[in-house]
Image (cartoon, rainbow, N blue to C red):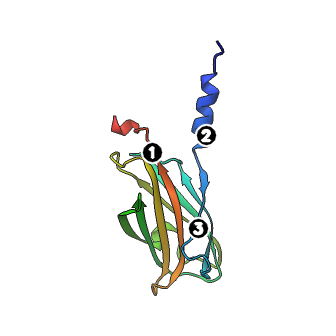
Amino acid sequence: MSRIPILPLLLLLVFSTIVLATDVHYCEENAEYEVKVKEVNISPNPIARGEPATFTISATTGRGITGGKLVIEVTYFGWHIHSETRDLCDETTCPVETGDFLVAHSQVLPGYTPPGSYSLQMKMLDAQKKELTCIKFSIDIGSVPSVADM
């Protein structure tokens, strides 16, 4: 009987879930958004319940942005389960200069969060509530409970 080396397998599992880029889609396929999203990274991926998760959005803008809001909607199996609005300047450095910038947010999901795939929609609004971008992407919540759940 052959033996499978456990350590290399564990290292592969740990390091393959640290940061992965997520498929991102614009809410309206043909819309001309002022903010173009290049990539969304989620760390760790899948997200561990009861542990911090960081969302980092790489984007670019053709004009300066003095402030605004991020409006986030979450659905699970098609059911709307969560909404939140965050100040853009709490998630990035304001004013946002023309060119590339990052939006980063960390959050701990409760230990009782059901495992599975969730859909997120994020709108970025400027200080006058004009929609600068709208993206959709999925996140996966792991089924293995964190140490905090035990």
Location of residue 109 in the rendering, given as x and y in whole percent from the top left corner? 39, 51
Q: Secondary structure at mark 1?
A: loop
Q: Earlier in the sequence, mark 2 or mark 3?
A: 2
- Amino acid type, residue under disc 3 in the picture: His
Viewer-closest of 102 and 33: 33
Q: Earlier in the sequence, mark 1 or mark 3?
A: 3
Q: Which residue is mark 1?
A: 48
Q: Residue at x 50, y 55 (%)?
A: 139
Front label number (2 vs 3): 3
Q: Secondary structure at mark 3?
A: strand
* Res. 25 mark: 3
- Amino acid type, residue under disc 1 in the picture: Ala
Location of residue 81 in the rendering, given as x and y in whole percent from the top left corner? 35, 62
* Res. 98 mark: none
Q: Residue at x 55, y 81 (%)?
A: 65
Is there a contact, CB below 8 Å, between mark 1 and mark 2? no
Is there a contact, CB below 8 Å, between mark 2 and mark 3? no
Above or below: residue 48 compared with residue 57? above
Viewer-closest of 6 and 61: 6
Viewer-closest of 87 and 50: 50
Is there a contact, CB below 8 Å, between mark 1 and mark 3? no
Q: Earlier in the sequence, mark 1 or mark 2?
A: 2
Spatial separation of the CA atoms under disc 1 and disc 3: 24 Å
Q: Residue at x 59, y 36 (%)?
A: 13
Above or below: residue 53 compared with residue 83? above
* Label 1 Cα crowd, 10 Å radius (few <14 / some 14-19 / many 20+): many
Spatial separation of the CA atoms under disc 1 and disc 2: 14 Å
Front label number (1 vs 3): 3
Above or below: residue 60 compared with residue 7? below
Q: Which residue is mark 2?
A: 15
Q: Tell me: 39 left or right of 43.
A: right
* Label 2 Cα crowd, 10 Å radius (few <14 / some 14-19 / many 20+): few
